[in-house]
């Protein structure tokens, strides 16, 4: 089953009166359950815009987006927030953990907006932190964690609502190569456990660690290749 | 969305995580609320003090002042004491009017020095008729009051307040001793009961009173300054005023006297004090608004500072309304808690002032008003920052550096 289907999607940003930037120029793409797909491209290729549209953070200028067979263009902001909350997890380059807040509370955050009771929330958050190997760091705040650990907390947060798909936007971009490799291994393990993951990166080496690579250039898909799994 | 409860906790923990800033933000509201309560309680204490003091001055009292005094329009200039055309004959005739008028007394006050064995004291000498003591509630602790025969016979007698006795005589019993006023020797026949606490009633403890006839002779002045009449009861005061007006109109020109109910004098003073209290409270309320602007300022900074946090919350599923409510609650809690602290400080300050200065009273309405205004300030000034936060685009917010 396709989690996301996009058809002829374009995205045009209007900057000033006569300056238009065509970030996406007609993209067709389908993401199926269990995929581990990387979107690669240089800066300005439209990969972030594509991720935002697939992650329901942004709407296309034209074309159709179906998320779990729902047509996204007919949904309002509150409904999109609800879909993100229930079905999508996000991991960002700069972690985006809340300051002066414990790992446990950071991970539990999405569940607050899902209306989950505090006890159940913390229990779930603890499970996810254990799953990413931070069972002994539950009450550390972000300043007390290394970059790699912070990204693990962010991954646990992305998983806490048992999402249908996880978007990771340059998850290793702010990490040294060793921590980066660990994070990639964690993402691969999560994929093996059944999670659908889309990874946005500009580094071909990182993209090689995924099962499928979509290369974007100037707002269009240049290549869509299956990687040999190692 | 389950529980505003949760959002309230979010707001509280966000305030708690930024303790220093939260306290500084609250400061404006704290000072505003505290000063409203303090100033209003001071003003009300002053009103109570003056009302009580006038009640000490005797009940059911109607005063006839020389000159035009119009209390409806505020006191228009001071009474024309120097041009007074009142005479003792008027007082005697008023005493004989009967009806609603219980009694009337004449009085005159002049500054002079009195001395006893080299101890000298500058004070106000009151010349009074014998009814004055009973109308004005002057009680003697030793000796006797000024009597009718003292007045009729122009006796050289004097009654003194306790403070005056202490200054002139020390521990010596003053009764029967003679004090000097100008070139006259006056025999002390009575000592007035001491009145405790601060009392603005012409400083009773330094009172020096002699028969009015004696004072007229000593100072060579036949006029009297003031006629103090007493109505038979509170209900009779309006009737008494009419009777006195009618009588005075047969004696003097309209502009030469004014009949004034002491109660209306009190209410006039209280009206003036009320206006002053309201003005003071209003000025203090301006600082509340300034405090509110401070909250708005900090909340706007906070929204900017937490742009990424807001973006993240939206990405993981917070609806615009969730964000709006969170920031609104933060602003309201800041101003509400600031208001509570302000109430404690204001009420505490009023209590402390009450111990040292004048009796203050913290009224329910000033507390309720100050708190209500501070909470409203939080909501009103919290709306703009909260709206800005709720409208942030999650993508822009996440990108924000």
Image (cartoon, rainbow, N blue to C red):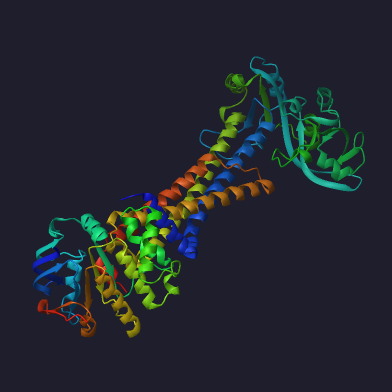
Query: In this rendering, does residue B384 appear at all?
Result: no
Q: Position of residue B195 (x, y in %)?
A: 76, 37
Name the residue located 64 percent from the left edge and 29 percent from the top edge. Answer: B63
The quadrant where residue B256 appears: top right
Q: Quadrant of residue B359?
A: top right
Q: With B239 as the anchor, is B221 left or right in this view?
A: right
At horizontal 64% and vertical 14% (from top left) the residue drawn is B99
Q: Is residue B161 above or below residue A56?
A: above
Q: Is residue B101 left or right of residue B317?
A: right
Camera sees residue B333: yes
Of the pair B91 and A230, the residue shown nearer to us: A230
Q: Residue furthest top?
A: B99
Residue lying at 89% horizontally and 44% vertically, measured from the top left: B170
Query: In the picture, which quadrant includes the N terminus of chain A?
Result: bottom left
Depth order, front residue of B307/A58: A58
Left or right relative to B338: residue B297: left
Residue B49, given in percent of the width and then of the height, sits at: 64, 39
The total of numbered circles placed on residues is 0
Q: Quadrant of the C terminus of chain A?
A: bottom left
> Which is nearer the eye, B382 or A84?
A84
Res A22 quadrant in image: bottom left
Residue A9 screen position, x and y as percent: 9, 68
Left or right, B227 with reference to A160: right
- Please state the horizontal and vertical placement of residue B157, each as a whole percent of the image: 86, 32
């Amino acid at each position: 089953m396709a989690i996301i289907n996009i058809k002829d999607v374009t995205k045009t940003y209007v900057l000033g009166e006569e300056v238009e930037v065509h970030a996406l120029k007609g993209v067709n793409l389908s993401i199926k359950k269990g995929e581990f797909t990387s979107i690669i491209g240089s800066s300005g290729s439209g990969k972030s815009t594509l991720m935002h549209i697939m992650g329901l953070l942004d709407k296309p200028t034209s074309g159709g987006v179906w998320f779990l067979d729902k047509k996204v263009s007919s949904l309002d902001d509150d409904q999109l927030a609800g879909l993100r909350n229930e079905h999508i997890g996000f991991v960002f380059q700069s972690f985006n953990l809340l300051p002066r807040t414990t790992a446990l509370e950071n991970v539990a955050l999405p569940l607050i907006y899902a209306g989950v009771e505090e006890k159940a929330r913390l229990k779930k958050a603890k499970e996810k932190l254990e799953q990413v190997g931070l069972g002994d760091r539950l009450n550390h705040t972000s300043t007390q964690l290394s970059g790699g650990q912070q990204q693990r907390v962010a991954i646990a947060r992305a998983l806490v609502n048992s999402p249908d798909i996880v978007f990771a936007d340059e998850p290793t971009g702010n990490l040294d190569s060793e921590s980066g490799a660990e994070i990639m291994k964690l993402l691969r393990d999560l994929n093996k456990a059944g999670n659908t993951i889309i990874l946005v990166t500009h580094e071909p080496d990182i993209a090689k660690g995924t099962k499928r690579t979509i290369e974007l250039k100037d707002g269009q898909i240049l290549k869509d290749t299956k990687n040999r799994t190692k | 969305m389950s529980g505003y409860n949760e959002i309230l906790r979010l707001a509280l923990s966000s305030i708690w995580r930024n303790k220093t800033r939260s306290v500084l933000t609250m400061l404006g509201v704290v000072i505003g609320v505290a000063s409203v309560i303090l100033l209003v309680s001071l003003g009300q204490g002053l009103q109570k003090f003056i009302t009580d003091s006038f009640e000490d001055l005797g009940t059911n009292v109607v005063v006839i002042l020389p000159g035009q005094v119009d209390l409806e329009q505020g006191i228009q200039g001071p009474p024309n004491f120097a041009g007074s055309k009142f005479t003792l004959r008027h007082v005697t005739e008023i005493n004989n009017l009967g009806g609603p008028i219980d009694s009337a007394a004449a009085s005159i006050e002049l500054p002079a020095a009195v001395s006893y064995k080299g101890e000298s004291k500058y004070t106000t000498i009151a010349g009074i008729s014998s009814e004055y003591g009973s109308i004005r509630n002057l009680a003697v602790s030793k000796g006797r009051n000024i009597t009718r025969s003292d007045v009729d016979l122009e006796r050289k007698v004097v009654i003194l307040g306790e403070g005056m006795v202490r200054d002139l005589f020390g521990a010596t019993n003053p009764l029967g001793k003679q004090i000097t006023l100008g070139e006259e020797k006056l025999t002390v026949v009575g000592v007035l009961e001491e009145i405790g606490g601060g009392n603005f009633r012409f400083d009773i403890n330094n009172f020096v009173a002699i028969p009015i006839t004696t004072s007229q002779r000593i100072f060579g002045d036949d006029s009297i300054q003031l006629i103090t009449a007493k109505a038979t009861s509170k209900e009779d005061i309006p009737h008494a005023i009419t009777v006195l007006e009618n009588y005075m109109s047969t004696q003097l020109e309209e502009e030469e006297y004014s009949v004034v109910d002491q109660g209306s004098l009190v209410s006039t003073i209280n009206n003036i004090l009320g206006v002053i209290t309201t003005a003071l409270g209003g000025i203090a309320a301006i600082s509340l608004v300034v405090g509110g602007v401070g909250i708005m300022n900090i909340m706007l900074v906070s929204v900017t500072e937490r742009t990424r946090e807001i973006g993240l919350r939206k990405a993981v599923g917070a609806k615009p309304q969730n964000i709006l409510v969170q920031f609104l609650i933060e602003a309201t809690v800041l101003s509400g808690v600031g208001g509570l602290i302000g109430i404690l400080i204001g009420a505490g300050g009023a209590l402390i002032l009450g111990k040292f200065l004048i009796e203050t009273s913290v009224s329910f309405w000033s507390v309720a008003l100050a708190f209500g205004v501070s909470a409203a300030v939080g909501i009103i000034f919290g709306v703009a920052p909260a709206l800005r936060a709720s409208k942030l685009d999650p993508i822009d917010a996440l990108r924000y550096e």
